Image (cartoon, rainbow, N blue to C red):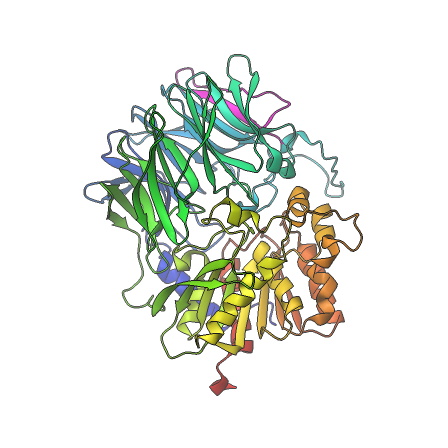
Amino acid sequence: MQRDLRESASYREAEAIYQMLRRPGSGQICDAADVHASPDGRHAVFAGTLVERLEGALPTRICRVDRTTGECRVMTFGPNVDRLPRYSPDGRYVAFLSDRHRAGDFQLYLLDSDSGAVRATPFVDGWVEYLHWSPDGRRVLLGVAGHGADIAGGQGAVASQQAQQETPAWAPEIETGEEAYRWRRAWLYEVESHEVRQVSNTDTNVWEAAWCGNDALVAVTSPGPSEGLWYTAHLHRIELATGSRELLYVPESQLGWPASSPSGRHVAVVEAVSSDRWFVAGDLLVIDTRSREVRRVETAGIDITYAEWRTERQLLVAGHRGFETVVALYDAHTGSFSELWRSDEITAGYFYACVSGLNDTGDCLLIGESFERAPEIAAIRGGEYRAIKSFDLADAGQTKAVARVERLTWRAPDGLEIQGWLLIPYGEPPYPLVMHIHGGPVGHWRSRWLVRGNVFAWMLLRRGYAVFFPNPRGSSGRGQDFARRVVGDMGGADTYDYLSGLDHLVARGSADPKRLGVTGGSYGGFMTSWLITQDPSRFAAAVPVAPVTNHVTEHLLSNIPNFVAAYLADTYTNLGGKYYQRSPIMHAHQVRTPALNICGALDRCTRPEEAIQFHRALLENGAKSVLVIYPDEGHGVRKFPAAIDYTARLVDWFEAHLRPQTAQ
């Protein structure tokens, strides 16, 4: 395999697709995230993607859209990334985060809604991950990570940039596990005095926090900064005047998305079996901060991923149920839960469903999308969906690759119903088919814009391949009992959810059994590696991305050892236990499938050593294997032009091994 693919046909094709979809240098907005409605509901701000050139991470700018006309205006001009805009309660300011002064070092900026003038606030000691306005609009809560703290796995799993230090090139790197820069703290910005200060104690790591009235915070905390400690974090109320903590809730699983009613009387939080920070989808809990009563809300099977208090009693939520994205309203006084909108064709939110409320009746804004639908800002009013502004820049007809999107269900060998999506190309079956396995394992495939992260799948569809997106046991959207079925058994029954799905597609004539491929990243990389060891004759080609291949080294080298222990329910000191039985490297001698192993050199979640050792074990045992390491990437390939190269390599690999029989 060539190191430089830039002159290859597949690279040029992938580059042309990205050019068509992103329109670099045109000044046009090609994608959107983080929508937030103005208090009067007339406008919304969002982070819009505007590309000058396909280099590095794609930059975003703070943009404003008129909700009536759809007219957009770019409000900031970088450089680098401006993101997470949030209106103040009176609408006067838009607070946002930017790394315009130094890449990756996000700090708080304020934009005047009337004049458009932007001012910097005093820099905090670290980089800001998120922000929240206080209910009275006098302060802004900042979630601050130290320079050098790890970025979450779903966001890249690299170490953030440390402050520049004058050290010689030969100086060694030192790790003690007690580095101060790993901690996450809560800070406040005072609008009137234009000052910042840390408000959480030095012995408290604050993973995620929100206001709890104007004088306290509600926070997901742990006693240390290790990424692994997030899995056992508790919920606390923190008094701003004293910094004292009060325990509100000790979960059985993981916590995310804390939110409080304006007075601080009620706190909402999501508890769920979770494999990644910022990927929490599950049960909605509402806690009375006076009585300490914890109410687990009946959500009609919806795994909640977003919560926003509109009034003291009205809580707007969004989440997933099977194939559907759902928006609902919970009344804290009556305990009623009402669905407002649901769709199995349109979804919302980058990682998981999220919206922005317009009033106390549940009307809201969202960024809607689907496999074939480019992102668009839309409104839900009275349960009806209406598009406001689309960001589809592609030429009509050039992006048509999918003949049909099918929602699948099938039975695993133990009788459990499994769901998934099948994207069917033009042409006649049976098709060569590539199965794409999501990360997690507690993840979720939904109908998201195909060309944002899956351009390779789009290119395969154009070549006549079907693409299969399964949601096996452990996936979100099917309730906590379904998610827990993978905990302690990763690489067990979930293995057969995938294989039985392929059996189903072959039996009904949709897939050619001799032309099956498999790929996936993170847990999907583990499962790709695992499947080709467990069913050596099944697949004609495999591409594990950012995989786990040896659970012992994953436990000892990665930044999330707690994850391995939890999802195997074992320990590496148990010789011959699941750390060994479920490690693909221990079964490499059985592999006959050609494997393209891909990883990022900076990945702290699944270290590059995972891909390296599996590749070498495959070669040692006579299997065909190629190893690709991207030097500037972490957990997944996200930057340009590496993303183009990655796309071209996947397409080339599957084309080489799954090409139609008539071409062989």
Q: At 37% from the left edge and 51% from the top edge, which residue is drawn?
A: 324
Q: Residue furthest left?
A: 69
Residue 432, relative to residue 223: is it above or below? below
Q: Is residue 52 left or right of residue 340?
A: right
Q: Is residue 355 visible?
A: yes
Q: Is residue 7 visible?
A: no
Residue 545 occupies which quadrant of the picture? Answer: bottom right
Q: Quadrant of the N terminus?
A: bottom right
Residue 382 occupies which quadrant of the picture? Answer: top left
At which x and y percent is residue 99?
48, 37
Q: Is residue 193 left or right of residue 416?
A: left
Q: Nearest the camera: 146 or 267? A: 267
Residue 648, relative to residue 392: is it above or below? below
At which x and y percent is residue 478?
46, 49
At which x and y percent is residue 166?
68, 35
Residue 37, relative to residue 49: is it above or below? above
Q: At 65% from the left edge and 36% from the top edge, which residue is drawn?
A: 226
Magenta range: 183-205
Residue 280 counted in the magenta span: no
Q: Is residue 455 left or right of residue 357?
A: right
